[in-house]
Image (cartoon, helix red, strand yellow):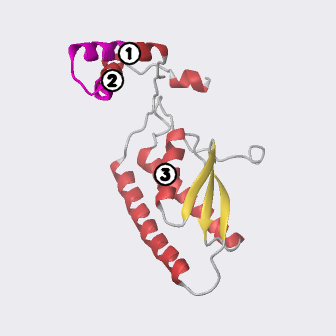
Amino acid sequence: MSPASALRAPSSGPRSPWRRVVPVGWLALVWVLLWGRLSPGNVLNGLAVGALVSWLLPLPTVVLGARPHPLGLARLAAYFLKDLAVSSVQVAWLALRPGPAPRAAVVAVDLRSRSDLLVTLTAQLLCLVPGSLVIGTSRSRLYVHVIGASDETAVEAFRRTVLLLEERVVAAFGSAPRHPKTTFSIHTPTRQERP
């Protein structure tokens, strides 16, 4: 199944008519706000423009399949808050300590998930932690700028931290593999798949 057809896969049950009406309504509201005057003509023109835009530029149906798991969310929140506190202290120490500026590195981390949602969530959580910033992605690989990566041991420790964060994200939002609509899975690359 191609990625485009996976995005357009029908959900179980009948399609809701609100799927088309709600975006047209929002576009009409934006139209009226842009004109700055509520009048029947502006509302009708906004509805016409919204319908035209929705018809010419339809959005694909995205089946996420993500189900939040309360226990997984609690573990992710606890892990993230601990990482946030520890990283804040480490970055503060690197900024205040005497001596040369800390070394930084760009680290490539191969994630095991193939889900765009899980990769995005992992990247966003990494960006919120002081001392790390995601500067690029390539499908399931993140390129992260890290402060304090002085040697290969520190780089490997950071990779393990990112993979642990990814495991927590999967536990919080991933679907169980036995479900037929599973969108998320963990994939460990083989030697042939690694660049």
Amino acid, disc 2: Trp
Question: Label 2: few (<14), some or many (≥20) within 10 Å?
Answer: many
Disc 2 versus disc 1: distance between alpha carbons? 8 Å
- Vertically, is 48 above or below 11? above
Pointer 1 residue: 49
Report the residue at 44% width, 66% height from top: 84
Amino acid, disc 3: Gln
Pointer 3 residue: 124
Pointer 2 residue: 31
- Vertically, is 1 above or below 44? below
Q: Position of residue 163 (x, y in %)?
A: 57, 57
Residue sitting nearer the eye, 146 or 176? 146
- Circle 2 SS class: helix
Query: Residue 193, located in which quarter of the rendered image?
Result: top right
Q: Is residue 147 left or right of residue 130?
A: right
Is residue 17 among the parts visible in the rendering?
no
